[in-house]
Image (tube, rainbow, N blue to C red):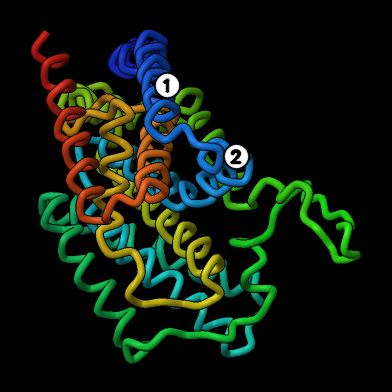
Amino acid sequence: MSVEADRLVGRLAGFKISSDALHKLSALFTLFMLVALFAFGNAAFLSVGNGLTVLLQTSVIGLLGIGMTLVIVTGGIDLSVGSVLALSGTVAGLAVKAGIPVPLGMAMGIGVGALCGAVNGIVITKMRITPFVATLGMMLMARGIALQITGAAPISQLGEAFGRLGNGSLFRVIGMGANGLPKVIFPGIPYPAILLLVVAVAVAFMLRRRSIGRHIYATGSNEEAARLSGVEVDRTKFVAYVMTGALAGLAGIVLMSRLVTAQPNEGVMYELDAIAAAVIGGASLMGGVGTVSGTMIGAFIIGVLRNGLNMAGVSAFIQQIIIGFVVIMAVYVDQLRSRR
């Protein structure tokens, strides 16, 4: 690619990830947290243990949201991440049940997720089928495969090693209670939360500092201009969908590890949570706009909202209504911004 073309791609990508957008997202998150503190400001909600629980619960949606951000920035969508999550976790569970070492079994699950993403990318770029239809088909196929290979039954008794990733923690402190029994002084930072942080930093670095990240923004900003600038648009989309599938597979591993059971029925409607996290975080469904930091804010907003509503005794149906309203308002704000 020529120097002039690279500058054009940089301009197409650069203005989409401005610090002003991050400041607005930070202000939104701060405002939300203040509202949450007043709404759910009881001792249990504000406890350290509950905060770590929110981190743990948000990790799966955060991983899915990061992957969803990648395809949304390219101007696409992926409705299959919930089903891919279930299929990847199921494959990992079957592998471990068959006697394969846990790390290798989990790697196989992530590989299955990447393979599903690759199929999505090929169908979209080579067969020229719209992302909505292509990933809708993958959503049905992945779920069907997960149910077929398990007979729609959960895979249990996967062992303590399988559950270490989802249930372990760093800096866990255990002391001795007055009754002589062990007592948890500090529950530690959950491994899924640490994994989410590592993935978020890595993907954010890729989007900001690597050429593939600039190409992803350029493709979503103006596909034809990016192509004329020398960007391999089809390859860029393919890479984005593969990474999204791999992250869905990783999310499936984390979730099944938390349950210590591979559930083929898990992940239903998770794709909507992932889209909501990205959109609330500032990603535009028109493409070209979105950041990992914004998606993390969106994921934590959803996590804190659900946690607080659960502790307040609000039914799951009302929670769906509230989160749906938040998503609609986030999209409406994005449309107002686009018009300006």
Taking the spot 41% from the left edge, 77% from the top edge, the residue there is: 263
Which mark is on residue 47? 2
Measured Cα–Cα span from mark 2 to mark 1:
16 Å
Write down the residue under mark 1.
Answer: 34
Vertical arrangement, residue 123 with respect to residue 279, above or below: below
Task: Work out whether residue 81 or residue 263 is closer to the camera in this orientation and state it.
Answer: 263
Mark 1: which secondary structure?
helix
Quadrant placement of the N terminus: top left
The mark total stands at 2
Position of residue 248 measured from the top left corner of the image (x, y, whole percent): 40, 57
From the top left corner, tell me how far across and down residue 168 is, in percent.
Answer: 68, 59
Q: Nearer the viewer, residue 61 or 55?
A: 55
Q: Quadrant of residue 99?
A: bottom right
Mark 2, Cα crowd under 10 Å, few <14 / some 14-19 / many 20+, is: few
User: Is residue 6 something that shows in the picture?
Assistant: no
Secondary structure found at label 2: loop
For badge 1, the amino acid type reads Leu
Q: Is residue 44 visible?
A: yes
In percent of width and height, residue 184 lies at: 77, 55
Residue plotted at (46% across, 57% down): 251
Q: Is residue 177 left or right of residue 109?
A: right
Assign the C terminus to one quadrant of the image: top left
Task: Mark 1: give few (<14), some (14-19) or many (20+) Cα within 10 Å.
Answer: few
Q: Position of residue 213 (x, y in %)?
A: 41, 30
The vertical placement of 149 against 258, above or below, is: below
